[in-house]
Amino acid sequence: MAKRSSGKLRAPDYTLLIIIFSLLLIGVIMVYSSSAIWAEYKLNDPFFYAKRQLLFAFVGLFVMFFMMNVPYQKWRDYSNIILIVCYVLLIAVLIPGIGMVRGGARSWIGVGAFSVQPAEFMKFGLIIFMAKVLSERQKYITSFKQGFLPSLLLVFVPFGLIMLQPDLGTGVVLVGTCFVMIYIAGAKISHFAGLGLLGLVGFAGLIISAPYRIDRIRAFLNPWEDPLGDGFQIIQSLYAIGPGGLMGMGLGQSLQKFFYLPEPQTDFIFSILAEELGFIGGAFVILLFFLLMWRGIRIALHAPDLFGSLLALGIVGMLVIQVFINISVVIGLIPVTGITLPFISYGGSSLTLTLLSVGVLLNISRYAKI
């Protein structure tokens, strides 16, 4: 059994808090700027998405400050229950009549006027459980049968359920985050090398099994082959980023949000940000994410126990992978996947769970020996 931390409780990492508030503020402003035209046309209320994002932000901040004061060791005690609840939600969303279909994926469960995305809960729940298992069984992690293989099973069962929705983007974030944790826990590179070969075969199978994924690959390689179909979204994204130049067209002055770029307040919000605020604005946001990663890794390195270190690294890894995928999609480096930009994109489940996660990270910082 892992030894509990008895470190002295300190003030949270104020630098990390400032970074989070900065990203949230930029997010609310950009959600309004990118969605006002759509919201006024579709809902007769230009502030519709902005008001809801502000509500999500306040709820998320309340949760974040609450979690910041809950000793992170308690998550280890309840990790089994949390994971079971996440599995129940993940299975429930697949049941017709319970799960809601959006964008071709059954990924949502309606709760009154709002909806939740169980896969978001699973990302957080699995990070906690993996941190517990890896910290308690670290001595076995170099063994393929006793450590590495059981860890993989913990990852690929929820990944399989998420792929039944299907939601490849969220599944990739979940797998990538857990792999980071397994590697940091001490797994052998040779095991990952062998897994990589199997992963390529499996990834190819996932692409071949769904024709729309093949279409996305084609659109990625040459979006102008089908400019009004599969290539439309990435072309419109590039048309937004290009004119932004160095300084941008000015806040609120985007042209692509006028019904060219679909749902600009969600996955492709960085396109509108780059168009309005230019290279400097986009680089500033990326810098904030780099600073968040730096503070998170610093907290993990100085955490008082292995569970805290792995939990912190899991949270940071989840955010960094999601940021990398989102921005890479927006600028055309990888094929389109439905991944939001943390703190910036519109979305209740994503924003609330992200703030809950950083609340746990902030609590770890209160015990970190910095």
Image (cartoon, rainbow, N blue to C red):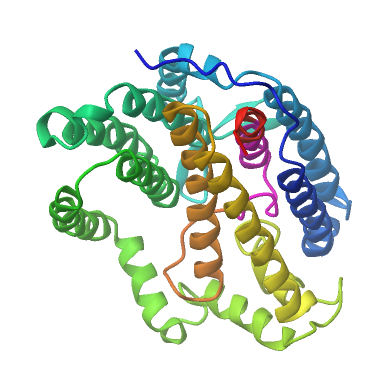
User: Can residue 125 be seen from the camera position used here?
Assistant: no
173 on left or right of 53? left
Q: Name the residue located 66 percent from the left edge and 18 percent from the top edge.
A: 70
Taking the magenta stretch, the answer to whether it contains residue 348 is yes
In the rendered image of this protein, does residue 290 appear above or below residue 6? below
In the image shown, does 35 or 20 lie closer to the viewer?
20
Report the magenta stretch's main SS.
helix
Q: How far from the left and from the top, in percent, is residue 104?
A: 46, 49
| Quadrant the N terminus occupies | top left
In the image shown, does 168 or 66 lie closer to the viewer?
66
Q: How far from the left and from the top, in percent, is residue 343?
A: 69, 49
259 on left or right of 220? right
In the rendered image of this protein, does residue 367 appear above or below residue 166? above
Magenta stretch bounds:
341-359
Count of all numbered marks drawn on residues in the image:
0
Q: Name the residue located 74 percent from the left edge and 78 percent from the top edge.
A: 280
User: Can residue 302 be seen from the camera position used here?
Assistant: yes
Q: How far from the left and from the top, in percent, is residue 300?
A: 52, 40
160 on left or right of 5? left
Taking the magenta stretch, the answer to whether it contains residue 13 is no
In the image shown, does 153 or 17 lie closer to the viewer?
17
Question: Dividing the picture into quarters, in which one does residue 34 lie?
Answer: bottom right
Q: Name the residue located 71 percent from the left edge and 58 percent from the top edge.
A: 265
| Quadrant the C terminus occupies | top right
Question: Dividing the picture into quarters, in which one does residue 369 lie?
Answer: top right
In the rendered image of this protein, does residue 328 appear above or below residue 111? below
Q: Name the residue located 27 percent from the left edge and 41 percent from the top edge.
A: 186
Q: How far from the left and from the top, in percent, is residue 276?
A: 79, 76
